[in-house]
Amino acid sequence: MVNADFWLDSVKGRLRVRSDYALAKRWQIEPSRVSQYRRGRLRIPLAVVLDMAAVMRCDALEIIASLEWHKAKERDKAAINTAYFNAATKTVGERMSAIKSESYSPRR
């Protein structure tokens, strides 16, 4: 299951920014908060998760489930897995085609 690092780096890639500072500026928060999200010291607020989902063209539940899975009790992990994969399968085709078209460069 992916973690906050993955999502933050993916959003940076999609936005074509290099720094966590740029993410912090987008979300109007202190740059140290992004670092705390990465380390798991702070939970990513729902408004930020919704923006991340919009940028990534995915269901917000996919992000929420993947972030919560690491903290969940063993008895709850199966339910979170199911929610994550159900959310992911709804938009994976659209995301894959978007990624392919964004990164396409013909060889010469």
Image: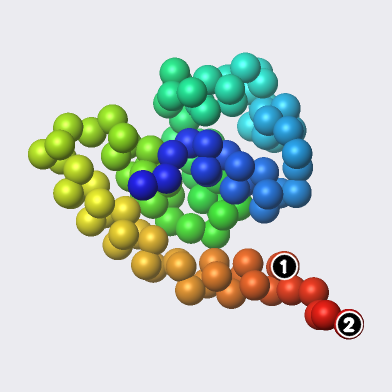
* Residue 54, placed above or below residue 33: below
Whether residue 99 is situated above or below residue 43 in the rendered picture: below
Residue 103: assigned label = 1
Q: Name the residue located 59 percent from the left edge and 25 percent from the top edge.
A: 34
Q: What element carries label 2?
A: loop
Label 1 Cα neighbours within 10 Å, binned few <14 / some 14-19 / many ≥20? few
In space, the residues marked 2 and 1 are separated at their CA atoms by: 15 Å
Residue count near mark 2 (Cα–Cα under 10 Å), binned few <14, some 14–19, many ≥20: few
Q: Which residue is drawn at 15% across and 36% down?
A: 74
- Whole-percent x and y of residue 18? 75, 39
Is residue 24 visible in the rendered structure shown here? yes
Residue 51 appears anywhere in the view: no
Residue located at (48% from left, 36% from top) = 4
Dividing the picture into quadrants, the one containing residue 20 is: top right
Q: Report the front residue among 44 and 75.
A: 75
Q: In this view, does 106 lie above or below 2?
A: below
Relative to residue 13, is residue 74 depicted above or below? above
Q: Is residue 87 left or right of residue 107?
A: left
The residue wearing badge 2 is: 108
**Furthest-right residue in view?**
108
* Residue 94 - label: none
Residue 92: x and y, percent? 46, 68
Q: Which amino acid does label 2 sit on?
A: Arg
Query: Disc 1 residue type?
Result: Ser
